[in-house]
Amino acid sequence: MTLLEILILLVAGLLVGFINTLAGGATIISLSVLMFMGLPLNVANGTHRIAAAFQTITSVSTFRAKKVLEWKKGLALAIPVVIGSIAGARVAIEINEAIFEKIVAIVMVLIMFLILLKPQRWVEGKQELIDKKLSWKQVLLFFLLGLYGGFIYVGIGYFLLTAIVLSVGYDVVKANAIKVLIVMLYVPFTIGVFMWGGMIDWQYGLVLAAGQVAGAYIGARSAVVRGAGFVRWVMVVFILFSVLHLTGIMDIQKLLLSI
């Protein structure tokens, strides 16, 4: 690994950790950077989860310290997600890479629209839903979310957050704490599946993790709020370039090497 690669990964990790703290959904950046640096999409899909694991541990610790984490309901929701994520990760390591690239490109476009629409502004908690026991429909919903998270991971935070608020009834703050807990619990299982498939670059993953944890720490201690709008546009730019790269319209790796 060259010094330039280390610097790129650290900066990308800082950006992802910072943005995820302020706005969320920045995993698209780490996936894109790993892909632009030459990792096959399947390997990049496994590698960036290393950083996600470290960041969620930090986040869960913070939410626990603030006493806003609903452990009982969070653990109950995590069970179907974990089961679904293992199945999704198995599909991700076995699927044809060309097909996978097209699927990820479509998902990236969808995530771009979610970022622009900012759906988190209108969600509110409902106590009557919180008090209810989980139904089979909710279990199925979170299993499917786990299936998606194990398969691609990009955007899973938005989907989990929306499901926890609209289906389970928590306000955004508590829903975000539960979301992070769920991700922290299921990511190690998907890492195991990608390790089994030989689709993790540990050097890239650990360097990215170092930057991402630092970025999360800085973001958590920062009072910056105005940056959220700019941050979303940065993410949109990354998505657009990623889609161009995945669809073969533009070779980002070749472009970077020519600079």
Image: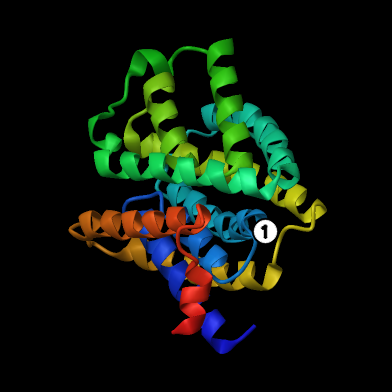
**Residue shown at 45% from the left, 63% from the top:** 250
Q: Is residue 140 above or below residue 16?
A: above
Whether residue 155 is visible here, answered yes or no, is no
Identify the colour scheme used.
rainbow
Q: Is residue 127 above or below residue 173?
A: above
* Residue 52 pos. (x, y %): 55, 55
**Residue shown at 53% from the left, 34% from the top:** 71
Is disc 1 placed on a helix, strand or loop? helix
Residue at far left of view = 226
Nearer to the camera, 10 or 167:
10
| Residue type beneath disc 1 | Val
Q: Is residue 156 above or below residue 245?
A: above
Residue at far bottom of view = 3
Left or right of 3? Residue 97 is right
**Residue shown at 61% from the left, 54% from the top:** 45
- Quarter of the figure with the N terminus: bottom right
Left or right of 149? Residue 259 is left
Nearer to the camera, 111 or 99:
99
Nearer to the camera, 113 or 160:
113
**Residue shown at 58% from the left, 35% from the top:** 148
* Residue 189 pos. (x, y %): 71, 45
- Quarter of the figure with the C terminus: bottom left
Left or right of 223? Residue 92 is right
Mark 1: give few (<14), some (14-19) or many (20+) Cα within 10 Å: many
Nearer to the camera, 218 or 14:
14
- The residue where tag 1 is placed is 43
* Residue 248 pos. (x, y %): 51, 57
* Residue 107 pos. (x, y %): 47, 41
Whether residue 149 is visible here, answered yes or no, is yes
